[in-house]
Image (cartoon, grey):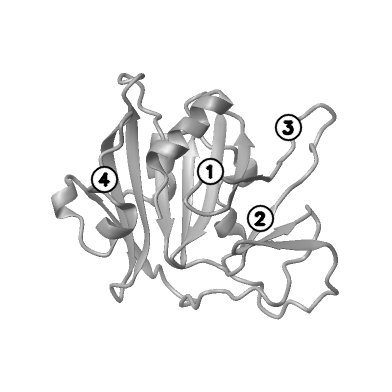
Amino acid sequence: MISRRSFIKGAATMAAAILTPVDRVFRRPTGAASRPLGNFELYHGFVLLDEDEPIPDFVVFPHIPAEGDPFRGKMVSSVDAVPEPFKKDLRLRDKPKKHKLRDIYLEEHVSGTPNEALAAYIRLSKPNRGDGPTLSVRYLYPSPYPMRSSPPVEPGGPAVEVIKVDYLPSSGLMVPSARGYIYFWISGGLLYTLYVEDDPGLDEAKDTALDLATG
């Protein structure tokens, strides 16, 4: 069975520093002691943290069963086969001007509760490349959603920079990666992530966000 991670890797190569921020904070460590709050910023459903800043106690984590693998994923071959509410939340009926839908991956809890949906696109200007943009909508996530910035690990190396942007469906964030840009925003109680990692320039990444961003 294909996994979320392998689906995204097949669609785009992601920066390891922010590969899946939610995977690193999805469960608060059991028995973790509270730590004094330091510097943080609340921003449109996100909490912005420095590299070593602890996750604030007010962050609410979704309840996830502790044992077994509670999620199941599947590929869907056509838009017509996508069940609600995935179709509505990804707005798959909308027709982007500069991209074509390629693959859809759905993940749900074994109870049937949706967890995440991903749609991989082909850029019409680069039809032979297999690493076009990927749009994710996540139903279960920590709230407010932690996002960390960090300095370079090595002198002259890449830093993780969290940048505020105002051209998404709601005020959101952009993180430059090794091969492009990753966008985050929250709308209607859902966490959206758009991976634009086919070596675009900043203007092309912004144009992609304007074409594909939903919510």
Mark 4 or 3, nearer chain start: 4
Q: Quadrant of the C terminus?
A: bottom left
What's the distance in space between the residues labelled 4 and 1, CA to CA?
Answer: 18 Å
Q: Which residue is mark 2?
A: 147
The residue that mark 1 highlights is 167
Residue 134 visible here: yes
- Tag 1 or tag 4, which sits nearer the N-term? 4
Q: Please tell me whether mark 4 or mark 3 is closer to you in this view.
A: 4
Looking at the rendered structure, the secondary structure element under dot 4 is loop
The local secondary structure at tag 2 comes to strand
As shown in the figure, which amino acid type bears the numbered disc 2? Met
Decide: marks 4, 3 in contact (CB < 8 A)? no
Rendering coords of residue 5 (x, y %): 44, 47
Q: CA distance from mark 1 to mark 2?
A: 19 Å
Residue 213 appears at what percent x and percent y? Answer: 42, 45
- Residue toward you, 119 or 33: 119
The reply to whether discs 2 and 4 touch (Cβ–Cβ < 8 Å) is no
Task: Check whether the beta carbons of the residues at disc 1 and disc 2 lie within 8 A of each other.
Answer: no
The Cα atoms of the two marked residues, 2 and 4, are separated by 29 Å
Q: Which residue is mark 4?
A: 94
Q: Residues under labels 2 and 3: Cα distance?
A: 17 Å
Q: Secondary structure at mark 1?
A: loop
Residue behind mark 3: 158
Left or right of 101: which side holds 39? Answer: right
**Sequence order check: which comes first, mark 1 or mark 3?**
3
Residue 163 is left or right of residue 94, and the answer is right
Circle 4 residues within 10 Å: few <14, some 14–19, many ≥20? few
Q: Nearer the viewer, mark 1 or mark 2?
A: 1
Q: Residue at x 74, y 37 (%)?
A: 159
